[in-house]
Image (tube, helix red, strand yellow):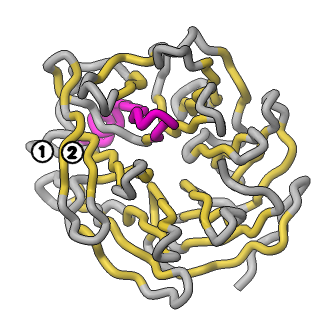
Amino acid sequence: MSAPALTGFATEELAIVASVEAHEGPVYMASEDALYFTTVPHDRADGVRIVAIARLDVATGDVTTVVEDANAANGMTLDRDGRLVVCEQGGPRRDAAITRVDPRTGEREVLVDRVDGRPLNSPNDVAVGPDGAVWFTDPAYGWLQGFRPRPRLGDHVYRHDRATGATALAARGFDKPNGIALSPDGARAYVGDSGRPHHVRVFDVGADGRLDAGRVFAVVSPGVPDGLKTDRDGRVYASAASGVQVFDPDGCRVGEIPLPGAVNFAWGGPDRHVLFITTDTAVHAAALTTQGA
């Protein structure tokens, strides 16, 4: 089953890989030709949000569950050791956290659950830099959606240094920081704000890992930016209400993958030229003429 053709951007095809309740955090594992993702949230009567981490075998379309209850997991990425780095949003009585999960066993390790002694809000998206540092956004969506306590931290972006174990404030001034991505060389950080501004900001990353004051990179419309990724040529991809919008390194929109309902996406395939896109009802694959960062 095919989806509409891309507009203003080269592609070979866009098709559904599997009809499944995929939602957030897609991560492609090259050694397995498999896509890991978090499923559509289901709220229990007691306010606990149930989200699973699932695995899609790209060749066969088979879907299996890796973690039955992943603590309301949202965005995910891979670290340099092949572990999933997961944004766990938490619940009424469960702490939010950034964790490492072994995709084979489901074994979980907590990296961050507090900043300056205060609990995280509800981490949304995560990226790992060339130096192994973990960058993540922490909006208060859990409080707004009724499954997390009142926030004790602002809606900020943080950087966790794996070498020292320290977590530091990286950027502030957001309404609701959402997707996060790094440029191919790790010199720039892009953060989508899915609150009132509905734009993507870009920050220069200093030698010490600190960010500058940042500036508006691009405004996303219709809707708000959610998933965020870059390709090898420095283009930036942001999901919007109409699909996945593509911006050149200067912030000019150069094309779109028209797919209403697109939530998040990940580069994959043998040459990293396939963009796997999750919606609440399916996983789509767009074969592009570029490669992921």
Q: Quadrant of the N terminus?
A: bottom right
Q: Is there any visible trace of residue 136 in the rendered image?
A: no
- Which of the two residues, 151 or 185, is positioned nearer the viewer here? 185
Contact, CB < 8 Å: mark 2 with mark 1?
Answer: yes
- Which of the two residues, 224 or 287, is positioned nearer the viewer here? 287
Secondary element type, mark 1: loop
Quarter of the image holding residue 151?
top left
Horizontal and vertical percent for residue 238?
66, 44
Would residue 24 be counted in the magenta stretch?
no
> How many marks on residues?
2
Q: Which residue is mark 1?
A: 94
Drawn side of residue 106 relative to residue 94, left or right? right
Horizontal and vertical percent for residue 208?
47, 14
Drawn side of residue 177 relative to residue 161, left or right? right
Which region is colored magenta? 127-146
Q: Is there any visible trace of residue 255 in the rendered image?
A: yes
Q: Residue at x 68, y 20 (%)?
A: 216
Q: Residues within 10 Å of mark 2 (few under 14, many from 20)?
A: many
Against 30, residue 43 (above or below) is: above
- Which of the two residues, 240 or 156, is positioned nearer the viewer here? 156
Horizontal and vertical percent for residue 2?
74, 80
Horizontal and vertical percent for residue 155?
38, 23
Would residue 139 be counted in the magenta stretch?
yes
Q: Residues within 10 Å of mark 1 (few under 14, many from 20)?
A: some
Task: Tell me, for residue 267, which label it has, or none.
Answer: none
The amino acid beneath tag 2 is: Gly
Secondary element type, mark 2: loop
Against 5, residue 97 (above or below) is: above
Q: Which residue is mark 2?
A: 90
Q: Residue at x 56, y 47 (%)?
A: 227
Q: Residue at x 47, y 40 (%)?
A: 127
